[in-house]
Amino acid sequence: MTDLIPLSTCLVLIPALPLVAAIVVAVLGARLLKERSHYVVVGAFAGSFLLSCLLLLHLNANQAGNADGGTERSAGFAQVVTLWTWAHVDDAYEFESTDPATMADAGPHDFDIRIALRADALTGMMLAMVTFVSTLVAIFAAGYMHGDRGYWRFFSYVALFVFSMTMLVSVTNFVLLFVFWEAVGVCSYLLIGFWYEKPAAAAAGMKAFLVNRVGDFGFALALFLIWSTYGTLNFHDTLADGSPAPIALDAAVSPADGPAATVTDGVVRGVLGVRRITANDYVGGQVALMICLLLLLGACGKSAQFPLHVWLPDAMEGPTPVSALIHAATMVTAGVYMVARCTPLFMASPEAQLVVACVGGFTALLAGLIAMTQFDLKRVLAYSTVSQLGYMFMALGAGTFTGITAGMFHLFTHAFFKALLFLGAGSVMHAMGNVIDMRQFGGLRKRLPITHWTFFLGCLALAGVPPLAGFWSKDTIVAAVHERAHELEHEAAHRHEVEPSRPGGDHGRPAEDQGGGGAIRHFAGHSHAADGEPSLVPVALIAAPAAGGHSVLESLSTEQLHRYAGIYQLLYYVAMVTAFLTAFYTFRAFYLTFYGEERIPPEAEGHAHESPPVMWVPLAILAFCAVFAGLAFDRTYLRVDATHLFAEFLANAPSLAAGAVTTTKVPYEFHLMVAGLSSAIALSALLIATYLYLGGRREILWLKSIFDFELIAGNLDVEAVAGWSRVGWIAAIHRQARAAHLGWLTSLVGNLFLMAVLVLTTPFLLGRTLSPYNLSQRKFYLDEIYFLVIILPMRALGAVCFVVDRWVVDGTVNAIGRIPPRFGALMRPLQLGLVQFYALAMVLAMLVLVAAKFIWAAG
Amino acid sequence: MDVSTLLQLSVVTPLVGAAVLAVPGARRYARYIALAVTIITMTLVAGVIVAFPADGKTDGLFAASETVWLGEASGLDVRFSLGLDGLGIWLYGLTALLMWTAVLVSWSAIRERVALFFGMLMLLEAGCLGVFAARDIILFYVFFEFTLIPLFFLIGIWGSEDRRHAAIKFFLFTLAGSVLTFLGLLTLVFLGAHRAGTTGAWSNSPDRPLNFSISYLTAELQSQHATIFTSLDRDASDTLSLQEVLAGKSPVRRQRARQVFSEQTGIDADDPGLQQAEVTFEEFQGRDAGLRHLVFWALFLGFAIKVPLFPLHTWLPLAHVQAPTAGSVFLAGILLKIGTYGFVRFSIPMLPDAAAAAMPILLWLAVIGIIYGALVALVQTDMKRLIAYSSVSHLGFCMLGLFAFNRLGLQGGTLQMISHGISTGALFALIGMLYERYHTREISRFGGLAKEFPWLACCMLLFTFSSIGLPGLNGFVGEFLVLLGMFQRAWTGTPLPLKASLMTVAVLAVTGVVLGAWYMLSLVKRVFFGETRVPASTDRHAGEGPHGDLCWRELAALAPLALFVVWIGVQPRFFLDRMQPTLNQVSDVVANPWGPAEPAPVAAARAGVARRPLMPASRPSLGDTNLRPARDGKESAAGHSLVPGATTVEVAAPGTSDLSTIHAPSWEPMPRVR
């Protein structure tokens, strides 16, 4: 089977098929294909999916072969397929180095960017996930979009998106990553604004694009810094002429000769190339921190993390299949993918990893809180997506092998159950005549039985109820964060044991990191294995032996270790709380939609029935995956042969197979304590939601009144106070006073009174505006804050600049322009036209000249 | 046919076309004649471009041809000299391409004095083609000024309500700058003639006529520069910066120059060659340095107004708003590029030291232009003015790249010129099409046009994306390379005092990318999305112009531009490769504006890494003679006493030192590059 189509062909065809489909539909869609456009697209997606599976087989086969063969693991590492050269500038970068470690890279570097793809485990997994979900979504959309005016346009955009997304995960340099990073953003823009007649949709599309641009600003800065630091933008190692270097792993993974031997002459080491990763030649200190934070900003934009998460909920204006495909399952995971891909860069900066984790944790909590009070079913799911992406970032920020694979695993399982939930919401919307406000419908379980059951499974998975998919992945994340905190504490304690006499301040910080730009040194032989602490033994399962990498924790002081450990511990609690929130809002939405008395909005008249098979079959398939994806890949629960198939597969990606990350590798194990705790939390939240929302709507009765300060602020109302002036006896007094020419007095008293009331009630009003309920309902007013803090000042600045432009800049120009005419005007009176005057002037001038001559001569 | 003949013909054809249009009988067919001439010119231009070597490597000039204009007998060797290199080739092509668009968008929009209009357009095209192909300073300047006249009439006759004011302002503003530019260009010629060995002033003698050739002057002035600076730059123990040397405040440096030269060449200190060197050096750093700075700023004024660089941009929005569509297309597409072209053609390669000194200022002006243009564009209510301000922003990116002084920046800046010409030209054409239908450009009067005008909306979206630098389309490539170059400059090739300043410039420039997306997308959103809203047509010509969605003619006007938008985005190498050798020559002259950046030990350790010489040696290298420690001798002793510890030159083994590849400066006048 694998011999049939070689790996490189697979890799090229996977994005090529959707691209061809997009072009075919764009060209022929309007006239020829029309309502048949989806055949082309679904066919192409399915083909891509099959090829992705084939690619996985290829990768797996290579890895299996490698397990026997020892070091010969070339295909498990990146295999690069070059299509053509995008841009080439000779000797664009003069790499100067005084550092013996990077001396090998010194010399002129070409700027050489090729359209090149590479396959490794990370790519293979992403490709399979993306093409699988998009195939199902395309099938669903064929039913959902039926009869839309822009049917072909929709499928053309979606195919273009899948092309961009598959390219995004397969390209092998930062420039192309950025190209397709923005390309998926454009597809998202086009699809959110698909119904461009709706002003809200057009605005949401633009908002998404612009917020993403802010992220891309960071990403672009990161690329420029990487170029300025490493002199290359390729992931893979290249030869001097720009072609991919052979992987030569024998040299690369053997640590015996030291890092210098890993660098073959004439090879430019890619930023994420095998040689550099193995030698762990990454710049540390401030530069690393800056690069990582900027990359994170980019990731925050695409993956909707705080503070750039605001676009995703608005993006729900797009057609629901788009929400499922782009804004839940695939595109928004691009940030996670990118951070995982850049693991070696992040390993060089534990501070940056901490920030990643914090951003993730904060976003997870924030989005969870907002999701609790939303009434738009799709927005609940959107915030839930933001929250789950936050989990993924938290996992990546844990910075350990387990953490990163856990993040990717959650990405993988989340794609299934979130796509399922969104498509379920789409199914509801389809039946309800495009109404998505949960206050307008309810009790739909009888009308939409299949949607109800599949949605239920999706909810269970999202809530993290064992043994569904979400449970396994979320559990690994929580455990990874927990473990990280422990590890840091342990490291600190260990230092204390080894060298108790030395003060903690600068301990362990390598000298070359002080300057902020030096490369991280290799701590040969450093290993925790001697400690006898099993969870800290670096297990060289597949990857380079421990000596190849080093523990990045070396660069942290003991104090920092303690502080970081505390923060990770805090994040662990945040993860637990968020797990509670997740289960709660998920089931809140579920009960509001499917339970209670049956209510159907007027828009749905006549078609409030279950969707056609073309829509529910994808739901069923996704539900199946949502149930079993975790069990199938996470085998840590087995007593014998406990392993994490998913993590083990990913471990073959260069970013995760070598370098510093391998030192954080621990044996796969099932954390019973964490698992039990998180399941208990999920179940308790589920029960609370059941109590509150099943049957009567208790939320309205008491929950809201508590969290909305209704008792305090309910009776104090400025309008009511202002209305007093119309109360009979007050008005009568006022009339009397006016008659006695004392109207000013009563007006004054009244106004003073009104002002007093205003001043007194302001705190209460403010309190009510900022009540927990309102904060959550109004999304913590972030949109408003951004408007006030960014958009408005920018517009004002623009207006000021325009005024300056017109009156100052152009005014100066005009003023200068007026000088010659003015000067001429001064001279004009001299031209009298009187001949006598001219004669007089001539004589006078001559006299003056002669006099001057005399004086000159005399002087 | 010979390529050089093709080139000549391509410049002459539009002139012939204009002449034909002047024939009274031809007026009825003015449009068709104009189209025919455009197509012929495009074919000729395409012929030239196809023949241009794919790697851009031409020995000397491509398609060069020249005829004596003012003979040597007059002492002024002015020639009608045409030729192309990697810098001019794409701008030359762009001119012909945009002419196609300009003619087609004017097809039904121009109803009065049609023949005159197209005649002016032809003249404009001839002028622009000539500017990019001219290889003689006088010829360049003739074309440079010549472009103003037809455009003046285009704006003044066929413009909107305020056309006279706009035309006069445009004309006077640009003329004021270019008069100084002319002085600057002439001074360049004198500087070129003023060379070591020709002591004394230039005399108007027939045997040594003044040389106006751009190629000659570039080579000559660069070699004057290299003569002095290679000998100083490569001094490993040098701790003084180039700018200090230039400031002429250090007699010690002068001393050093003589000493280094003496050591390198083994010529005695009394040698007449060495004395000559000193004369040259003194002239160069003393009187001439000041003069060169002056010339740079004179050139700057003319070119910067054309670009237009903040704060000299105010003529642009006015001219754009008032100009007819074809005028706007040409103005934005080509005429602005003449300014940036001038910087790369004259200012940077001919006055490298002055350019280096001015670089931080220009970078700041560029970045202010980027942000300022974008902010002002954000609050515009007139579509054309919005695009005009966006041009200020985009041209800021061009300037940023050019003045990053490295290969990436220069190539990016040059590509950005082409990209901006295509996308902004197309945007103006699109707005013109909309104007033709509704006779208004007020953004607030439109809404939701995408529903009725799907093709118009589609094209608008494509060119908007191209304009905001969307990856995969043309705008991205230039912008990306420019910023990459700028970052490389700020982070790796800048001395400490300037570093923070340049880093700020680099980071601020990137914000322009975000702002650019903001104003362009909100334009698209307000005009094309949302609920449909169109203004009632009030024009007296209502009913005559096109209605509904774009017609075939209009699509044909945009199609080639769209093709290039995608082509440049997907395969920029095709375009970069052809411009690369020329631009590399330019960037290598200024690559180290602050002298050597690397400390000596590294240079010594980097054995085996061949470096490119700054300048091709014009005679066999004498550089194998290694530097020796300062020996006895009056001058070197003086050097020692003045700069303690600074004059000890390290001994380097043959072939291992960087210093060994220094090319000895040539003291003879360069052979004329003709």
Image: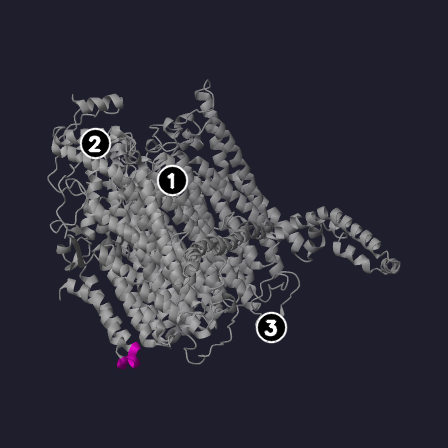
Q: Neighbour class for label 3 at 10 Å: few (<14), some, many (≥20)?
A: few
- Name the front one of labels 3 and 2: 2
Q: Nearer the viewer, residue B555 or B352?
A: B352
Residue at mark 2: B257
- Residue drawn at 58 percent across, 70 percent down: A608
Left or right for A252, reference B208: right
Q: Label 3 is found on which chain of the structure?
A: A
- Residue A596 screen position, x and y as percent: 65, 61
Which secondary structure is most common in the magenta stretch?
Answer: helix
Quadrant (top left/top right/bottom left/bottom right) for the N terminus of chain A: bottom left
Q: Is residue A845 visible?
A: yes
Quadrant (top left/top right/bottom left/bottom right) for the C terminus of chain A: top left
Q: Label 1 is found on which chain of the structure?
A: A
Q: Are marks 1 and 3 on the same chain?
A: yes
Q: Secondary structure at mark 3?
A: loop
Q: Neighbour class for label 1 at 10 Å: few (<14), some, many (≥20)?
A: many
Q: Neighbour class for label 2 at 10 Å: few (<14), some, many (≥20)?
A: many
Q: Which mark is residue A605?
A: 3
Q: Which mark is residue B484?
A: none
Q: Nearer the viewer, residue A454 or A584?
A: A584
Q: Nearer the viewer, residue A109 or A542?
A: A109
- Residue A314 screen position, x and y as percent: 53, 57
Residue at mark 1: A345
Q: Which residues are magenta?
A: B24-31
Question: Is residue A426 shown in magenta?
Answer: no
